[in-house]
Structures are given as structure tokens and as C-alpha cells.
Image (cartoon, rainbow, N blue to C red):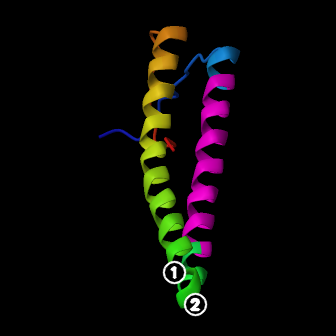
Amino acid sequence: MSGAHHDLTLQVGPEELRIRGVYETISIVNDIMVALWFIVGSILFFSESTTTAGTWLFLIGSVQLLVRPVIRLVRRVHLGRVAPGSPRSSARDF
């Protein structure tokens, strides 16, 4: 093997970057909300009178965990329509 390095140049349009940024932001907000539902739900489990509310927050957090792959799928479809030739995922995929 030689020690030569080859540069890889990818051309990404501004629309694709904007789309990726929007979906990444949505994904981050979703992850924060999931964490908050589970933290507050856990706190509510300390008292018997708030256990039902805590259970509802756990359910909301669990359903919201499904939102993350849905966001990724919608992003892939959106990018496929806007930039058909570009890769739809990367090592930085969220």
C-alpha cells in the first residue's frame, strides 16, 4: 500500500445543506424533549400521588423515541427529491 492520500471533493448545494440543518435541529430538539419526559416522569415516580402522571410521561417519551427514525426517513425522502444524486446519509447521521 502506498502512503498517498487522495482528497475527496463533494459538491453539496445550499438547499441540501439547509435541509440537512433543519432536520438535524428537529432531531436535536426531539432528543432533548425525550430526555425531559423521562427525567420528569422519573421524578414523578417518587410520589405515589403522581405515579400516573409519571407513567403518562414515560409513554409520551417512548412514543417520541419513534419520532427520531421518522425524522431521518422524512429527511432522506426530502433530500432524494431535492438532490437525487447526493448521498442521503453520512457518518454524522443523526
Give, as a three-letter code, the residue at label 2. Ser
Q: Is residue 21 magenta?
A: yes
Residue 69 in the image: state x and y as whole percent.
42, 41
Q: Is residue 31 magenta?
A: yes
Asked whether 79 or 32 is in front, the reply is: 32
Residue 63 in the image: state x and y as whole percent.
44, 52
Report the residue marked by disc 2.
47
Instruction: Answer above or below: position of 76 versus 44.
Output: above
Q: Count residues near mark 2 (Cα–Cα under 10 Å), then give few for <14, some for 14-19, many for 20+.
A: few
Asked whether 39 or 83 is in front, the reply is: 39
Residue 56 in the image: state x and y as whole percent.
50, 65
Instruction: Answer above or below: position of 88 versus 90.
Output: above
Q: Residue at x 53, y 84 (%)?
A: 45
Asked whether 6 or 27 is in front, the reply is: 27
Q: Residue at x 47, y 29 (%)?
A: 6
Q: Are marks 1 and 2 in contact (CB under 8 Å)?
A: yes
Q: How many marks?
A: 2
Give, as a three-letter code, the residue at label 1. Thr
Side (left or right) of 42 relative to 1: right
Instruction: Answer above or below: position of 85 versus 8.
Output: above
- Report which quarter residue 89 is drawn in: top left
- Report which quarter residue 73 is drawn in: top left
Report the residue marked by disc 1.
51
Q: Count residues near mark 1 (Cα–Cα under 10 Å), then give few for <14, some for 14-19, many for 20+.
A: some
Q: CA distance from mark 1 to mark 2?
A: 6 Å
- Report the span colored magenta: 18-40
The answer to whether one can see residue 34 in this image is yes
